Amino acid sequence: MFFSLLRPLIQQHPQRVLGIISVLLMSTAVPAIAKPESAPENQGGTGQPTTSRTVSGGTRSETLLACAAVDAGSSRAAFVPLMPENGTIATQAERVNLYIYIPAGSDRPGRLTLRDRATNTLIFAQPVSSLSGGTIMRFVLPNTVQLTTSETPEQGYSWELQVYCDEFNDEKDVRVTGEIHRLLRENAIAPPILWHETLEAAYAQRESNPEPWQQILAAHAIAPNSAIHNYAWDATVATDPLLADK
């Protein structure tokens, strides 16, 4: 109906009428709607886990900058797990604590997982509400995590700390990994070879006898006066079902 009324005008002044129609169409166009960002959730700062992967109070650019330190050349700018050169923590204990140096500027959330290497079964999966940058974080696993003995490291366990560097792209996250091998009791090994027991003893005596602890830090190029932040989960937690398939 509208265009039938305009037909005589279009025949007499085609270019002028078409120009007016173009202006009207442009002025009524619907603007594009930007994709909303994920709403930040509350993040606990007391070591209690949270299931949110959203960085509280941060934008995407700030998220990327927070993990930029891991690309720097200095060893102080890298995530450094305290473990032997072969990457396998040997122990005879049922449960281990993990020590990881967190570079400054990496106060990010993340998650810690533990898997059975032989079956790839998820043994433990819990979020870390916030990493403490510039410190050695001591992750204290709950009593619900009980390691079994095995003859070879390949039948042991693998662990991973995933640091959420980009809330939109998991491929940009930092992943710190290692292995755990709980040795058979009958194959007794001298205590210095039991990495976890040696590390725990040095940590416990770091004030009364600081030399062993400082030697371990020096071997990992970590400053001897680095602060230590203990991060513990509730004794009853094991695997967060929201993280089990991630």
Image: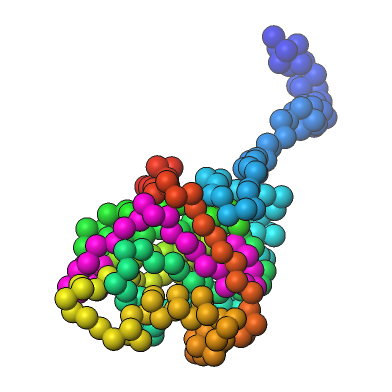
Query: Relative to residue 14, is residue 63 depicted above or below?
Result: below
Foreground pick, 14 / 73: 73
Which residue is at 75% across, 11% downward?
5
- Provide residue 161's location: percent of width, then percent of height: 46, 63
Q: Which region shows up in magenta?
A: 131-156
Residue at 39% of width from left, 48% of height from top? Answer: 239
Residue lying at the far top in this picture: please name it.
1
Residue found at the very far front of the displayed protein: 208
Q: How many marks?
A: 0
Q: Position of residue 128 (x, y in %)?
A: 53, 55
Q: Position of residue 225 (x, y in %)?
A: 65, 82
Q: Is residue 72 left or right of residue 163?
A: right
- Queried whether the magenta region covers residue 36, the answer comes back as no
Q: Quadrant of residue 131?
A: bottom right
State the image coordinates of residue 2 (x, y, percent, origin top left).
Answer: 73, 12
Q: Is residue 56 visible?
A: yes
Q: In the rendered image of this protein, does residue 234 appear above or below residue 214?
A: above
Residue 189 picture quarter: bottom left
125 versus 98 height, above or below:
above
Please name the residue shown 56% across and 77% down the image. 78
Screen quadrant of the N terminus: top right
Would residue 13 be found to the left or right of residue 145 on screen?
A: right
The main secondary structure of the magenta stretch is loop
Could you tell me if residue 53 is visible in this image? no
Q: How is the image coloured?
A: rainbow
Q: Nearer the viewer, residue 217 or 184?
A: 184
Where residue 83 sits, quadrant-wise, is: bottom left
Q: Residue at x 68, y 37 (%)?
A: 32
Q: Is residue 143 magenta?
A: yes
